[in-house]
Every structure is written in structure tokens, then in C-alpha cells.
Amino acid sequence: MRNTNPLRVVLVAIALAVSLPACAPMAGRETPGEYIDDAAITTKVKASIIDDLGLKQIGVETMQNVVQLSGFVDSPQIKARAGDIARGIPGVKEVKNNLVVR
């Protein structure tokens, strides 16, 4: 049988105890599944806005099913329509319409 050093056992135990919590997801961060879902929502919102309004320069970001629209549009009606399109995509929980009318 091998002779184990008690100090080595303690150090390994401490290293494991300290590193295991790092494996848990951090608050406010997405899991890989959420990231994939959000990417799909972003793609659907962008494609729908391009189809409906022909706007390619609008930024669309999604985090935990919350869509944020950014960029510039020519009228308040276009801004409102882009928000409505985003809200109509399945899985969207909330829309932050940060489009600027110029």
C-alpha cells in the first residue's frame, strides 16, 4: 500500500472545494441552451424585420428572451412596427425598442 502525505490530501481537498463553485452558472449569465435559444430569436427577429420593412441596418440583440432593437429609422411608425414584429416572434418575453427616429 502506498504511503500518502496528509498535507497533500488536504491541499487537494482545498483545491477541489475552491474550484467546484466555479462550475456553477453565474447569475446574469446564459447557459449554452439559453444562448442557442437567444441566437435563434435574434435570427428570426432580424429576418422578419428585413422581410417586412426592408431594414438591414437595425441591430438586434437577445439576452434571456429579451430583445433589444438599436439603430436609426425614418419615422415613428417604422419604429413602432419593428417593435411589434419583435414582440410577435415566439419566445420573446420583452422588447426594448431603442430605435432612434431621425
Image: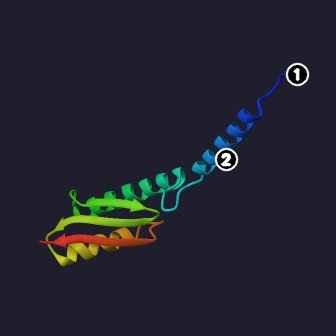
Q: Nearer the viewer, residue 92 or 23?
A: 23
Percent position of residue 97, x then y: 30, 72
Q: Is residue 83 above or below residue 7?
A: below
Q: In the displayed image of the protein, which residue is found farthest to the right? A: 1
Q: What's the residue type where badge 2 is placed?
A: Ala
Mark 2 neighbour class, 10 Å CA radius: few under 14, some 14 to 19, many 20 or more:
few
Element class at badge 1: loop
Q: Quadrant of residue 58?
A: bottom left
Q: What's the residue type where badge 1 is placed?
A: Met
Q: Quadrant of residue 15?
A: top right
| Residue hosting label 2 | 17
| Separation (CA) of disc 2 from disc 1 | 27 Å
Count of residue discs? 2
Percent position of residue 51, x then y: 28, 60
Q: Is residue 11 above or below residue 47?
A: above
Q: Quadrant of the N terminus?
A: top right
| Residue hosting label 1 | 1
